[in-house]
Image (cartoon, rainbow, N blue to C red):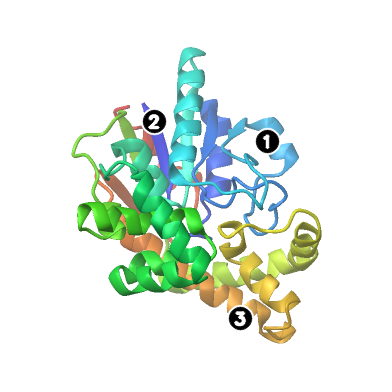
Amino acid sequence: MLWVLTGPTASGKSQLAMDIAAARGLEVLSADSMAVYRRMNIGTAKPTTAERALVPHHGLDLVEPHEQFDTSRWVAEAERVIQETSAAGRGLLVVGGTPLYLMALLFGFFDGPSADPDVRARLGADEDSEPGALHRRLAEIDPTAAARIHPNDRKRLVRALEVFELGGKPISELQQQFAAEPRFPYRAVWLDLPRPRLKERVRLRTRSMLEAGLVEETRAIEAASGFGPTASSAIGYAEVLQLLAGELAADELATRIARSTHRLVRRQETWLRRFPGLRRVSTSTPETTCVLDPLFDDA
C-alpha cells in the first residue's frame, strides 16, 4: 500500500508528512519536480538535515540545477524506492504537489508514438537554422505545452512536435490520459485549505524564503553551474534570476513570487480535481489528526 499526501504549494504538506511518518514509522518519497535539484533548498522548502535524520527521505537532490530531469526519470527513481522499501518491510508516504508525477507513478504514462530519428533530425536542423522556431511552432499547435516548455529546452520541444507530427494529437492532451487501473494499491489525501488562508500562507512562505537567503542561494547557483531550462523556471528562482538580470525591481520581487505561486496553486488544483480516488480533506489549520483517518482507516 502506498500512502499519498498531496495538495497545493504552501498547504502544509511537508510538515504534516514529517509528523505522520515519524508517528507511523514510514519513510517519505518527495513528489516535487523542483526538489530533485541539488542546492535548490530554500525555494523548494526541502526538509532540513535534522528532519531527514529523523525521517528518511527519497526523491531529493537527484541532479544538478543545470541538468535536465523529467517525469520518466522521477518515476524510475520512485519505482526503485518502492521496491527497496517494500523488500525491507518499510512503509512509504509519497508527498508532493506535482500531480503529474503522482498520476504517472500510479497510473502510468500515456502511450505516445515511438521516437523517429528522421523527424528528430529534421526538427533539430530547423532549430539550428532558425533559433526559436520550434517553440513558435509548438505555440501554434499546442499553446498549453508551449507555456510549460522553455524556448531553450530543445529536447522537450522536439518530443512535443514529434508526438504531434506522428500521432496528430497535442502532447498536452495525451499527457492527461492515464490507465484506468492503478499500478499500485494506494490511499491518497488532498489537503485543501480555504483560499484566503492559503493566500496568507503563500505570503508568509515567500517572506520566509527571502529572509532565509533565496536571493543569495540563487546567485551562488548561477555563479557555479548555472540553471538549466527546467530549474530556471522554478517559482522563486525564476523571479530572482529576473532580479539579477535587471529585469525586475527589488521591491517587486516578493509580490511577483507570490503571484506566480497563486497561479501554480490554481494549476495544481485543476489536476487534483481529476485525481481518481483522492480524499479531499478541507481544513483551515493543517494538523496531523485531520489526515490520519482518511489515510489509514481500513488500510
Position of residue 138 measured from the top left corner of the image (x, y, whole percent): 36, 68
Please tell me which residue is depicted at 41% across the width and 39% down the height of the picture: 4
Q: Determine the CA span between mark 2 and mark 3.
A: 37 Å
- C-alpha distance separating marks 1 and 3: 31 Å
Residue pointed to by mark 1: 52
Name the one closer to the observer, 173 or 31: 173
* Relative vertical location of residue 236 with respect to residue 109 in this rendering, above or below: below
234 vs 38: above or below: below
- Sequence-wise, the earlier of marks 2 and 3 is 2
Give the position of the N terminus as an image quadrant: top left
Residue 32 at what x, y percent from top left?
52, 48
Quadrant location of the C terminus in the rendered image: top left
Three-letter residue code for mark 1: Arg
Kind of residue sitting beneath label 2: Leu
Q: Would you identify the image quadrant in which residue 253 lies?
A: bottom right
Which residue is label 2 attached to? 2
Residue wearing tag 3: 255
Indicate the position of residue 180 as horizontal and vertical percent values.
18, 39
Residue at the (49%, 44%) spot, across then down: 31
Secondary structure under badge 3?
A: helix
The mark that comes first in sequence, 1 or 2, is 2
Residue ID at (27%, 58%)? 164
